[in-house]
Image (cartoon, rainbow, N blue to C red):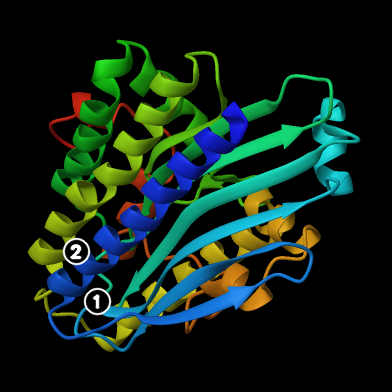
Amino acid sequence: MTLSQVNLESVKAFLLALQDEICQGLEQADGSGKFVEDAWQREEGGGGRTRVMRDGAVIEQGGVNFSHVYGASMPASATAHRPELAGRSFHACGVSLVIHPKNPHIPTSHANVRFFIAEKEGEDPIWWFGGGFDLTPFYPVLEDVKHWHGVAKAVCEPFGEQVYDDYKKWCDDYFYLKHRKETRGVGGLFFDDLNQWGFDTSFAFMQAVGKGFLDAYVPIMEKRKDTPFSEAQRQFQLYRRGRYVEFNLVWDRGTLFGLQTGGRTESILMSMPPLARWEYDFTPAEDAPEALLYKHFLRPRDWLAMSTLDD
């Protein structure tokens, strides 16, 4: 067994355990919903475990997926971005999740941690880690956003003073809808191509990010799940979910990679909300609660330095 195989097996073991841990934590927080597993195999190599919760007490629909796919060659989109991958076999494994709550006062959340390795006989393997987590509120509360970013910063601190700032900025830049000129939400962490710290430290950071998700999200779920909401607020939630769909189908590299490598379409598009809507040229009234999202939250900010929205 080569060193790269040993590393791959240790990463897979962690990811499978992480999927179990996150599903259990979200089931406990929801109170009644259960994840249903759909195991699948990829004809070209690999497979995964898709787990989906529908119509829970809190979670309208959510998925927590594990996948490990491999093949003899990379898709064109990957080699165009990274020409050094041409002619190499590859393995890609990860856990990816998206949670769409029922209550508009609970944000949608996304997290992903992944490992990639490409090999060619007679040459050193090319490998890296990636991932992060981000938050997409509809009726945001500064206290919740500060908590989310506080967990993100705590995850990063053992790995260097600049890590949180760098990966927060990367998240703000990545989850930006260029055609709308707004961020998808209030960000969090995003990192990719991580190998400069060596395998052990890079793997440790990926693990810390994966394990940080529940600490960041569950307290917000529990705090906002009983907040009353109106039908108008529900409709605004569905409208803003449309932005989530737009990003995933237009800009997200993971969606494209999954589809181009022959991944399971149902699992890849698990991230879509169960309901969404679009409305032509919608603009909230200036004094409406919905206007706060546009005025204060859909742009990068130093959330942890803020005490009020006017800071």
As rendered, which of 16 and 163 lies closer to the eye?
Answer: 16
Residue 28: x, y in percent?
Answer: 13, 72
**Discs 2, 1 touching: Cβ within 8 Å:** no
- On screen, residue 14 versus residue 259, left or right, reads left
Asked if residue 207 is positioned above or below residue 42 in the image, the reply reads: above
Q: Which mark is residue 25?
A: 2
The residue tagged with tag 1: helix, strand or loop?
A: loop
Residue 238: x, y in percent?
Answer: 44, 77
Asked if residue 94 is positioned above or below residue 226 in the image, the reply reads: above
Residue 258: x, y in percent?
Answer: 69, 59
Q: What residue lies at 70% left-to-right and 70% top-to-bottom?
A: 42
The residue type indicated by label 1 comes to Asn
Mark 2 or 1, closer to the camera:
2
Sequence-first tag of 2 and 1:
2
- On screen, residue 73 versus residue 266, left or right, reads right
Q: Which mark is residue 274?
A: none
Residue 99: x, y in percent?
Answer: 36, 67
As rendered, which of 277 and 198 lies closer to the eye?
Answer: 198
Asked if residue 271 is positioned above or below residue 85 in the image, the reply reads: below
Q: What residue lies at 43% left-to-right and 61% top-to-bottom?
A: 97
Q: Circle 1 is placed at which residue position?
A: 103
Which corner quadrant of the image does residue 311 belong to?
A: top left
Q: Is residue 172 visible?
A: no
The span from disc 2 to disc 1 (Cα, nearest Å) is 19 Å
Q: Is residue 166 visible?
A: yes
Asked if residue 127 is positioned above or below residue 290 in the image, the reply reads: above
Q: What residue lies at 51% left-to-right and 29% top-to-bottom?
A: 170
